[in-house]
Image (cartoon, helix red, strand yellow):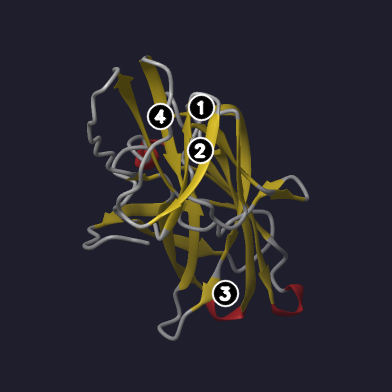
Amino acid sequence: PSSYTVEIGQEKLKFSGASNPLPDLLPGDYKVLVYNDASHLSVNNNIVTVTQSNGLVNSMPGWFFSAVTNVTYNDNVVDTIIVPMKQQIRELRIRLHAEGGSKESIKEIQTKLTGVAGSWDLMTNTATGNAREIALPFVKQADGTWLAVVRLLGIVGNRQTIVGEIIFDNAVPKNLHIDTDISSSLIDFNVNKYLPLAFTGNIETPTQAGFTGSITDWKQISQNGIAW
């Protein structure tokens, strides 16, 4: 990042550029925490937290990076430390292929993803706090598929589900409830966050009311490059 915060001892310093001098401190060992400012994120007591609205975490926080290291101060010794920062926000892309007799009548898809992390411990590099939910803003694409793109700190707990409803024009058929467990597909989501993660799945639309839909043929799409 072009600018970032460095916490060492009782000092909280704002830096920019690749190289900066650390403050003069008494001899001893110190933990160093480095991170940047990013939209919809706040850092307090080594914990970064995503803002929430109406019980849902923000679906598009800014790109956030952090690093932790140790440094030893000795009298009359000048040293250099190199601290590579890691990306802590991961992009998730979900594309749904609608099938069945009512696919052309879909007006909107209102769903959320459960089991996501609202906070992340920068010192231990692990999710913390209770499992949260995030809205999946599905938008119809030119090819007829529906795509949702979100950014997450990570997942938490053993269960992640997509729940919500497919809403049809003129309420015909009636709303199709969706409840799909995708935990197995997100097992390694908290690793290699710099790589975007993308999935596709099929959703069968009914010709009559009374069905609960599920996403089938769930497939991970290989993603190249870095998302940030």
Which residue lies under the disc numbered 3? 102
Name which residue type carries label 4. Answer: Val
Which residue lies under the disc numbered 1? 157
Regarding mark 1 in the picture, which secondary structure is present there?
loop
- With 178 as the anchor, is 56 left or right in this view? right
Q: Are marks 4 and 2 in contact (CB under 8 Å)?
A: no
Name which residue type carries label 3. Answer: Ser
Circle nearer the viewer, 2 or 1: 1
Circle nearer the viewer, 1 or 4: 4
Q: Do the residues labelled 3 and 4 touch (CB within 8 Å)?
A: no
Regarding mark 3 in the picture, which secondary structure is present there?
loop
Quick check: 77 above or below 226?
above
Name which residue type carries label 2. Answer: Gln
Label 3 and label 4: CA atoms lie apart by 56 Å
Label 3 and label 1: CA atoms lie apart by 35 Å
Name which residue type carries label 1. Answer: Gly
Label 2 and label 1: CA atoms lie apart by 8 Å
Residue 104, given in percent of the width and then of the height, sits at 55, 81
Which residue lies under the disc numbered 2? 160
Please report whichever mark, 2 or 3, sits nearer to the chain's N-terminal start.
Answer: 3
Q: Which residue is drawn at 33% across and 23% down?
A: 70
Local packing at callout 4 (Cα closer than 10 Å; few below 14, some 14-19, many 20+) is: some
Residue 128, given in percent of the width and then of the height, sits at 54, 27
Circle nearer the viewer, 3 or 1: 1
Numbered mark located on residue 32 in the image: 4
Please report whichever mark, 3 or 4, sits nearer to the chain's N-terminal start.
Answer: 4
Regarding mark 4 in the picture, which secondary structure is present there?
strand
Q: Do the residues labelled 2 and 1 touch (CB within 8 Å)?
A: yes
